[in-house]
Structures are given as C-alpha cells and as structure tokens.
Amino acid sequence: MFNVGRLASVVCLALGSTVPFLSMATTVSGIVQDDAGKPVAGAKVTLEGSSNTVYSDESGRYSLTLSERDATKHAHLHVHSTKHAHADKDLGLINTDESLNFSLTPVYVENIIVKATRLETSVIEAITPLTVLSGEELRKRQAATLGETLKLTPGVHSTYFAGVAASPIIRGNDGPRVQIVQNGLNVGDVSRIGPDHAVATDTSSATQVEILRGPATLQYGSGAIGGVVNVVDNRILEEVPTELEGEAELRFSDVNNERFGKIEINAGADKFAFHLDASTRETDDIEVPDFARTEPGEDDVEGIIESSSVSTDAITAGVSYIEERGFIGFSAQRINNFYGVPGEEEGISIDAHTNRYQLAGKYYTPIKGISEVSFTGAYTDYEHTELEGDEIGTLFTNEGVELRLDLELEDIAGWHGVLGTQYSDFDTNAVGEEAFVPRTDSKQVALFIIEEKKIKDVTVQFGGRIEHVEYDAADFDVAQNLGVNGDAEDRATFSFPEYDYDTFSLSAGSNWHYSKQESLAVSLSYSQRAPSAQELLSGGIHIATGTYELGLAFDLDENGILSDELSDATEEVSKNIDITWRHFSEKFNFTTSVYYSDVDDYIFQRDTGFELAGEEGDETFPVLVFEQSDAELYGFEFDARYKLTDQWEVKAFGDFTRAKLSNEDVPRIPPLRLGSSVDYFWNNWEADVEVIWYDDQTDTAELETATDGYTLVNAGVSYQTSYAGADWRIFARIENLTDEEARVHTSFLKDQAPLPGRNLQIGIRTYF
C-alpha cells in the first residue's frame, strides 16, 4: 500500500536532510478570545504546512501538540473563525512549550478562506477585491447556469443566453478575459468562444464559488486579465469524515417547469475518504411577459422563449488517501447537457458531454524551506454537437490536460510566498459547415511567484509571472468577399504560421489595517494577454450570435474584400489600479472598490456594417471583425450589510462600469445597477424582499442598440427544522414578482430573449 510517511522519509534521506528527534512532545497552547475578552469556541488553529489542526473549546482554550517532524520546521500558526477576522503568528523554530493567546476581531459576514489564492487569505484580508458565495447564500442564488448564479454579486453580470447558457461578466470583461476554473484548474470547455456554449461545471455540488475581480493573472495566466471564477467542491476530500455526511435537494420552478434534484455523500474509512454526488435538471421553454422578440414575426408564439428548454445530468465520484504527511486523491466526472439554441430557427439544439478526471495531492514539509507542495492535474474531454433537428450541423471538441505545481515557501525574514508552475495543452476543433474557428492546438507554460509580508498593521505583497503561449492551427477556408455583394461560397484556403506569445505580469499591493475594524487596500498591476484562438483565427458564421466573425489574423479592406496576406496581432497590455476600503464589525460590514485600467491594444469586435448572405440565401449575417485599439475601463462596486436587531437585517449593493475605446464605447457593457434587501429572522423562519434597479444603457458602440432600464423585485421565505438526525430546510421564492419585461444589455439575444417572467420556486433541502 502506498505510504506517504515512508515516501517522505526516503525523499528527506535522498536530499541529505536530517530530522532530529525530541525526547518529549512540544506543545503550543493558549486562549482564543475576541476583542472584548470573550472566549471564541470552535476556532480552528492550524500549523501551516501540516495537517496538524485543533479547535478551541467552550472556554476558548486550545492545545496544539507538535510532532517530532513539526518541531524541526519554521512554525507559523493560523486561527480561523467564520465570525471573526483571521489571525496568525510566526513563531520560528520551537524547541520548548509555548504559550500563545489570540485576540480576534468580530465580523458580521462569514469570513471564508479563499481557495483561489495559494496564500492563506480570507475574504476581508485580501489585497485584491473578491467575493465568496457559500452556504445558504449560494443555494438561494442557485441557477441552471454559472452566469445566472453569480449575476447579483457586486461587479458581476451575466451574458444571459435565454437561460440555456450564461457566463459571468466581471467589470465589463467576459469571454477570454475571464477564466472559469474548478478547484483551480480550467474547466476545459468552449464557453470562452461563444455565449451559447454552456460552462461545463455544476455549482449545485459546490461548497463555495469565489470571484476574484480585476486582474488575477499571476496564478491563473493572461486569460484572467479581467478576473477569475473558481468553483470549489469536495470531489477530492482533504480530511477523512468521521461519519456519513451529505446533502440532498428537490426543487421546482413554474416559469419553465423546472424539476431539479441532487444528492451528495461524503464518507470515510480508516485513511480513505470517499465522495459521490449526482444531480439532474429538466426544464421546458421559459415563459416571458410578452413576445420574446422586440419585433415578433407572424409565426412567433407569445409568452415563451422558443428553444429554451434544458436537460442536464451530472455525476462525480472521488477518493482520497490521507495521512499526517499529506494526501493524494482522484476524481471522475460526467456531465450531459442537452439544450435548445434560442433566437434561431426552430429545431436548433446542442448536445454536450464532458468527461473530466482530476488528480490532486499535498505533501507537507518535504524539505527545509518548503512548508507544502501542492499538485493538481486534470484531463478533460469535452464535445458538443449542434443539431438541426436530428441532423448534425457542427461538432465542437476540446480535449486537453492542465497541470499545476505550487511550492509554499517557509518564512524568510518575515516574507511568506508561493512559487508555482503551470502547463496546459488543449486541442480545440470544430467540424461542420458552420465551423468558424480552425482546429487549433493551444499550449501554455508559465512560472510565477508571489511573496507577502506583514509589517505591523500593513500587509505588503509582490508578485510576477512569465508565460509562453503558442497556437498551431490547421488550414482553414474563409469567405473572400464580405462586402455588399458578398458570397459565402466564394472562399480561399489560408495556412497559418505558428503563433507564439511571451507575456509577463507584475503586481504590487498592500492592505493597511489602520484600525481594528477598517482597512484600506491598494493594488497595482501590469498584465499582458495573448489573443485567444477565437480572437486571432475565427473566420465564419457564428450561428448562435447570428453574426459572421473575422479574427485579427485577417485583413479586410474598406470594400469588404479579404487580403491574401495574414496580419500580425500583438498582446493586450493592461495597467491597473484598484483601491478597496473595508469596514467590518459585529453589526455592520461595508466594502467598496474603485478601479481604473488603461489598456493598450484592447481586443474588441467591431460591426463593419456589411452583411453576408447565407448559403441558402434566405438569411444575412452582420460581419463583425476583431480589432485592437487603446481603451479605458473604470468603475466602482460596493456591498453593505447592517444588522438592525437580532431579527432584522438590511443589505445594499451596487456597481458601475465605463469602458471606452479611443473613439467609441466598448459594446455590451452592463449599465449602472443598485440593489437592496430586507431580511427577517424569527425562530426557525427566514424571509427576505429584494429590489434591484438597472439603469438605461445608452453608452453603446457604433450600430449597437441602447437598452431600457428595469426593476426586479424578488421575495423568499424558508423554514428550518431538525428531524431524524438531519437538518431540513423548506423554501419558497418568487423572482420578478411584478412580471416585468427586462432585456439584458450584455446579452447577444437582448432583442430576442428577455429575462424570465414571474417565477415561483419551491423546494426542500436536507443536510445529514
């Protein structure tokens, strides 16, 4: 049987390290209390770079016994409590018993440890702005798509593709500028190249979803220049459950006749931990207040979005082997997703399948100077078929592997950091008459480092990343004449060179806790992004958006004639500043961020005004070309929560983004948004009413239409009880209470598919 402890000993001997043995155990003990001197029970006390963890008792006392191996390394203790700010202390080398007390500052929001950052960072400590959805807040926002689940998070909107697909938009950035990862690794789908392509991850089994706003390029690469969404789940457990535990849910929604069910189970035996989850969702077409199209045709059906039904099922299984020195785990996932493509002729649908295999492991203190080695890897085999009735139109596939290795470094002169490397290789292909991107092999290799130090009340951080990206594309046929008399059948074959990009990113930031309850964080960054394969090489009809897309590699003259010579495309370069102010206390939490990005060679799509006739001649497609221009993006977001009494709570949030090119506005930028809610708690009952207002969006690109504002009203109630050894929650929620017609400006289908009408949702959830 694989023995992690024996392997550790062999590695240490091979490296010439020596491990002294102590004659007796060394203990660090003390009291965890809040600022008022009250004991904090259940606080998690952890020795960094080990699995050595204890919890404080009812009197706040803890006692952490260091093993012989623990006592030979640099000791750094962390204390976490969900209702208090995180505290830590660097103790250096310990050879005698130590007494160490901690004083924690109470906070109103749940202070969650963020998995997307490799350093031990909580929500209220982060230098860059971030939000974590977890627990009941995540379950309340649960939707069929990732974008719709996160759309009410400050700074986050949705591409909304009529409920069948939606990706998150972060501060006006979407597509290849926002990276979607699952447990830190790319989801490996094709959602970055089309709004009709659903994200291949299932948040119904997620423990938390983390949103990093602004450039997060150091750990995740140039594809995260706009932000990162990390979906965290328990598919590979790091601790052995002491008993069978899990969650189950049944839910129904009437606006689309949604039937949803899920079950999740975690179990342990000896040093093994097991995970299993499964879910299923079936819906009909979405009901809307009026006609779906702003200009309905004679055959349109009033009150529904045609071809907006969804059928999804997913299953994931994982197993971990866990010892004191570390763990190793493996998981396998299958997702089947069948959904319609609204806005096009009836009978268009997508049949998508994802197989994903993931390996993860940690090894604590392999050699002196490294407190932890983390390894993650994933192989993803994704495909989706675009069907025209029963006939296959286009087949998309994306097959590849991603590997990460992170070394958490022990403190040196107070500096604590992570050195990491990342490699990915994905083969993306589209086969069929409507394939608009050539088969492309995309490779990426990168090296990054982040170092952090606390100097009294100030945490400072520096980091850098170098990255090599290359694209190897197959020959591709592209229409030559896209002008007034364009003909889709008049085509030429292009042979592409191998495209190579070397990018680097730098960041510096600080977070100043100038009082027990306030902090001010400033982050500066310089980020480079290589064009995505779609931005560079696309050349064809994109059925879902009803457009003809042409990439940066092609040169189109003023008459719409394509040059025989290919063009060069340069990296997008972003210089950014982000300022975040936080106030946190037992009754009031407030976070606000302002940001500014100056972008050279910003990549965007411009409407040329040309329209290309389809091969059957009964449909035309506006010609959109990818171009580069300097741009400015700036805005703000805020989130506030105030506890009036033990029964009443009020919340407010808002965000605004302005994005301008050198001579026009960036298309599909979300409008100003403000929202508020009132929550009521009484015994086992909870209720809330929320109002979200969206302004008109008149800052539009050339040939882009404006969008009217709207106001959405939502309300919910739930009852929680215990029965048969499990916790039960029965809930009901009404969304869009006033049945308002609302059109999402960021959606390609804003004139063809509004948001759903009034929706009653009921369900039951249990935790055991």
Image: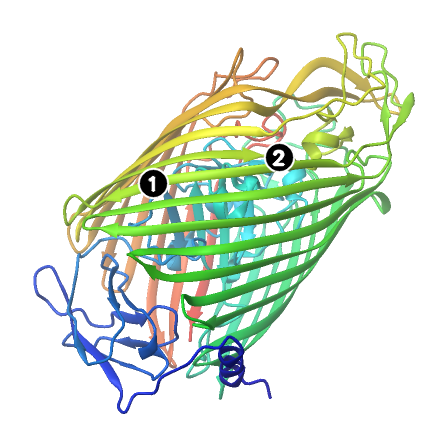
Residue that mark 1 sits on: 509
Amino acid type at image mark 2: Ala
Residue 146 percent coordinates (x, y): 54, 48
Name the quarter where the N terminus is drawn: bottom right
Q: Can residue 757 be seen in this snapshot? A: no
Instruction: Specify the color scheme.
Output: rainbow
In this rendered view, identify the residue nearer to me: 566 or 7. 7
Q: Residues within 10 Å of mark 2 (few under 14, many from 20)?
A: many
Distance in Å between CA atoms under marks 2 and 1: 24 Å
Q: Is residue 463 visible?
A: yes
- In the displayed structure image, the side of residue 351 where residue 111 appears, left or right: left
- For the point 29% across and 42% down, the residue is 510
**Residue 281 in the figure: left or right of residue 465:** right
Secondary structure, mark 2, is loop
Name the residue located 52 percent from the left edge and 13 percent from the top edge: 662
Task: State left or right for residue 313 relative to residue 76.
Answer: right
Q: Image height check: is 309 above or below 170?
A: below
Q: Quadrant of residue 483?
A: top right
Instruction: Find the residue positioned furthest to the bottom.
Output: 23
651 w.r.t. 565: above or below:
below
Q: Amino acid at mark 1?
A: Gly
Relative horizontal placement of residue 610, taking residue 203 as reference (left or right): right
For the residue pair 595 and 296, the one nearer the viewer reads as 595
Residue sitting nearer the eye, 766 or 578: 578
Q: Which sits earlier in the primary sequence, circle 2 or circle 1? A: 1
Quadrant of the rendering where the C terminus is positioned? bottom left
Q: Nearer the viewer, residue 693 or 470?
A: 470
Percent coordinates x, y for residue 491 in the rendering:
90, 23
Which mark identifies residue 580?
Answer: none
Can you identify the residue that label 2 sits on?
530
Number of residues whose C-alpha sits closer than 10 Å to that of mark 1, classed few (under 14), some (14–19) or many (20 or more): many
Q: Residue at x 13, y 70 (%)?
A: 39
